[in-house]
Amino acid sequence: MFRFKFKYIFIAFLLPLFLYLGLYTWNWRTGALDDLAASTGMEIVGWVLAPGKWADRKAGLLWNRYVSLVETEKENALLREELEALKLELIRLREQAAEQQLLASLLELSPLDGWDAFGARIIAHQIGPNAVLQTVFINKGRADGVSRDQPVITPDGVVGRVLKASSHFSSVLLLTDPNSYIPVLGQKSRTRAITRGQGRGEPLQVNHVPKNELLFSEELLVTSGLADIYPKGLPVARITRIEISELSLFKKVLSGALVDPFRLEGVLVLQRNERSEPLPLQQER
Amino acid sequence: MSQAIFWPLYTIACIWLHSLVPGLDCFAPALIVCLHLKRYQSVFWLGLIWLLINEGVGSIAFGASLVWDAGLVLFFFAVQVFFSSRHVYFLFVLAVFAAGWHYVVFFSMLNLQELQVHKEALIMNSLLTACAFPLAWIVIQGILKQHGTGQYVQR
């Protein structure tokens, strides 16, 4: 009787549980099921959403062109493109100027040296019950050269990094997600820290700033390039609050992200080029 | 409307709905409706496709949707021991279980993968799931019955 019951419980409950745990750990090591799901599920969703978004964009464009003054709109578009290019140039120059003043030895470094940027459109935000992290879905994938951990920015600042990619689509982990950590440094003070998201509409935490380190109010935080994910010098956030506690060895610092990722329509994906220095791991290999 | 047309259209509509309402799952209620109609072959194939879709666009490692769907299927058969899925109480019990199960599965999976997410966001998703279940059930049943494909499969 007991043997029969045990057999029944084993087949109905324990066997599937063992199978599941085996599958889970195998996938955790190899990522095979994640890749399979990304290259099928992500592609299906992308191809379902992309035409609708395209039609929506085209309809919006048509409407704007006919209703508003056509020439002004065209001129505006050109000026906007020029402005975005100038903003990128400004980021580079601002960082160079700060570094020239403070670190003469690093004069030759420029933040976007060794990186190429290409544009991508955001076609959706979090999709489905499994999208529990703050992500956006973009229309560029492995076929366009996108891979995991590539930086995603706008001319105004950092947006996040690529979380996973299928052939033609990718999801990007936003800097506002609590699992997003970005090594930064103060543009004036050159103090190093790590920003961490706290959710949509919430300020970013600036962690690991010792009490005796200098940090200015309203100071711009730029990427430090330490994690080998983001190039050095990209603007991330501006400090909004600095508190010093008697009980802690570190300052309590909050900052506001320069980009609201939930209002974006397009982003730039950064890709290392041949001028880029190889990662330490690649050098070892 | 045949099932071969209905389910692809339903899948497309769900993907759009999912992109508009983050955290919503319209696939799970449809899976339970298929079980209720004893369309086990549809449960397998649709379940597989929807599993890949949910896992593919998800931001956590593969496995959460599998546990989530398997739990719902087990619950469906367990509840049927006490009362039929045609009973109105069934929908209520299912919605409550779905909300609780959703929270347990995703909270455990996030902890297992050492990921952090605000509890309020998880609770909101669970409440959304509880509301979506009866609504989706009524809509799917209504459409299937209207087009003559909502009958039980005789075995």
Image: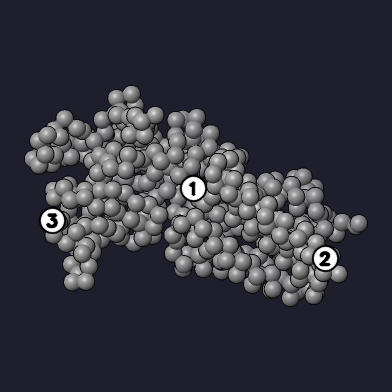
Q: Are marks 1 and 3 on the same chain?
A: yes
Density class for disc 2 (Cα within 10 Å; few <14, some 14-19, many ≥20) is few
Residue at 42% x, 37% y is A120
Dot 1, crowdedness within 10 Å: few (<14), some or many (≥20)?
many
- In which chain is the residue bearing label 3? A
The mark nearer the N terminus, 1 or 3, is: 1
Disc 1 from disc 2: Cα separation: 53 Å
Earlier-in-chain disc, 3 versus 2: 2
Q: Residue at x 64, y 57 (%)?
A: B67
Which residue is the site of mark 1?
Answer: A124
- Nearer to me, A94 or B146: A94
Residue at image mark 2 = A3
Asked if the residues shown at circle 3 and circle 2 are in contact, with their CB atoms under 8 angstroms apart, the answer is no
Q: Is residue B126 left or right of residue A222?
A: right
Quarter occupied by residue A7: bottom right
Q: List x then y, in percent, for residue A13.
A: 73, 61
Q: Which mark is residue A214?
A: 3
Image quadrant where residue A27 sits: top right
Q: Nearer the viewer, residue A163 or B29?
A: A163
